[in-house]
Image (cartoon, rainbow, N blue to C red):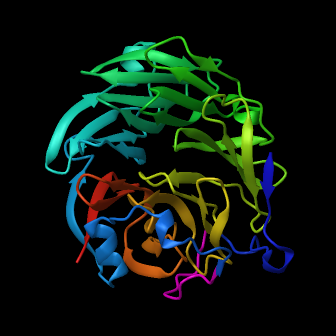
């Protein structure tokens, strides 16, 4: 196992700041660059979105949809975007509504289908798309795959041990999921066969998020220190690299990978960090400076990434060296995702509105 730590000279604790009353600032966080990747480590052709941002373009809202357009579903919990531009939105009432930026497609009710109509509020805590299927993990401890409006159970945990994260590997057609129990009870299951790995042994006391990068599963969360673990592609029970930082008191809340697989980004409530596909650190912020990161998404080649903060800001960063690229206000954001097909970044807000931003 390879274990990476930040050098002592850059370890700065920032836990004294309140995340409930952030100080809004236009000054971007200072960035500590550990390694600057060579140009050849990135795909040769960047997207027009990334090129625009790197050339000094601004983020401009170009579309929006209101998840509560007809029926009040409560606060947005999370959302996911498919390669075909469908958007699945999970809400406080337990429903999943499927949209495009042009309008409504369908509504799914996990409570009625999976538990019976007497169960209300089986809220979905994480979503992912695998081909035409919507993979959902809910607070009741069930992982389901929805297609053509109907689900099948593909995994889960003990009843009422809620799922906190799901991730999909499209080439192997694997679904990974983690729950709220100690160590995350992380499982990988084949969607088309009986392949099963897990529960995966881990040094993380809590698992908060999962992602696949180049076919390898990444676990994110909190152990003795906030950290990440990278699993072998052929045998996910084997940890091939790990990363930890004591630069914040909170655990890693979300992790995201670029489509090209060369860039991995993570956020805590205090910091933003970027690593390569082997968990070697590129850069990390030395404090939030009013930005309280909640969610992160990475553009196709990894040259740009996006975070949303509790203070109500969407920020674009250089994936190479952490340079600030653009900032725009968004109300009460909960998650950010990249629409790879449309060269857009989409922010979901607690009030149920999805806002799509392009670069101009």
Q: Percent x, y for residue 307?
A: 48, 65
Q: Is residue 223 above or below residue 307?
A: above
Residue 122 visible in the shown view = no
Main SS, magenta residues: loop
Question: What is the quadrant of the N terminus in the image?
Answer: top right
> Is residue 352 rendered to the left or right of residue 291?
left
Of residues 306 and 341, the one drawn nearer to the viewer in this rendering: 341
Which residue shows up at 23% across the image and 56% down it?
A: 342
Question: Quick one: which residue is furthest to the front in this view?
Answer: 40
Of residues 27 and 227, the one drawn nearer to the viewer in this rendering: 227
Residue 252 among magenta residues? no
Question: Quick one: which residue is furthest to the left in this view?
Answer: 102
Residue 233 visible in the shown view = yes
The answer to which image quadrant residue 145 occupies is: top left
Which residue shows up at 48% across the image and 17% down it?
A: 154
Question: Quick one: which residue is furthest to the bottom in this view?
Answer: 27
Q: Percent x, y for residue 228?
A: 69, 50
The answer to which image quadrant residue 29 occupies is: bottom right
Q: Is residue 306 above or below residue 323?
A: above
The answer to which image quadrant residue 5 occupies is: bottom right
Which stretch appears magenta? 19-31
């Amino acid at each position: 196992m390879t274990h990476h730590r930040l050098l002592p000279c850059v370890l700065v604790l920032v836990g004294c700041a309140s995340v409930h009353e952030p100080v809004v600032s236009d000054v971007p966080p200072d960035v500590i660059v550990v390694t600057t990747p060579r140009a050849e480590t990135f795909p040769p052709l960047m997207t027009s979105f990334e090129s625009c941002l790197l050339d000094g373009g601004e983020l401009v809202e170009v579309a929006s949809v209101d998840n509560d357009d007809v029926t009040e579903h409560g606060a947005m919990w999370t959302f996911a975007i498919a390669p075909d531009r469908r958007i699945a939105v999970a809400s406080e009432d337990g429903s999943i509504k499927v949209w495009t930026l042009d309008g409504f497609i369908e509504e799914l009710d996990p409570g009625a289908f999976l538990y019976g109509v007497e169960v209300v509020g089986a809220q979905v805590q994480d979503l992912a798309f695998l081909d035409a299927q919507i993979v959902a993990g809910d607070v009741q401890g069930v992982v389901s795959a929805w297609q053509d409006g109907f689900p099948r159970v593909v995994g889960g945990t003990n009843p009422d041990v809620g799922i906190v994260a799901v991730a999909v590997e499209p080439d192997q057609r694997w679904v990974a999921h983690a729950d709220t129990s100690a160590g995350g009870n992380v499982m990988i299951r084949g969607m088309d066969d009986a392949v099963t790995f897990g529960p995966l042994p881990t040094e993380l006391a809590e698992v908060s998020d999962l992602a696949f990068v180049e076919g390898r599963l990444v676990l994110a969360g909190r152990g003795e220190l906030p950290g990440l673990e990278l699993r072998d592609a052929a045998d996910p029970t084997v940890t091939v690299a790990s990363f930890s930082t004591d630069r914040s008191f909170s655990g890693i809340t979300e992790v995201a990978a670029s489509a090209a697989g060369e860039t991995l980004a993570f956020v805590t409530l205090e910091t933003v960090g970027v690593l390569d596909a082997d968990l070697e650190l590129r850069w990390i912020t030395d404090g939030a400076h009013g930005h309280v990161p909640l969610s992160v998404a990475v553009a196709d080649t990894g040259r740009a990434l996006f975070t949303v903060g509790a203070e109500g800001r969407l920020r674009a960063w250089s994936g190479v060296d952490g340079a600030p690229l653009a900032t725009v206000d968004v109300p009460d954001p909960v998650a950010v995702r990249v629409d790879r097909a449309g060269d857009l970044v989409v922010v979901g807000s607690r009030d149920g509105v999805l806002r799509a931003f392009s670069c101009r």
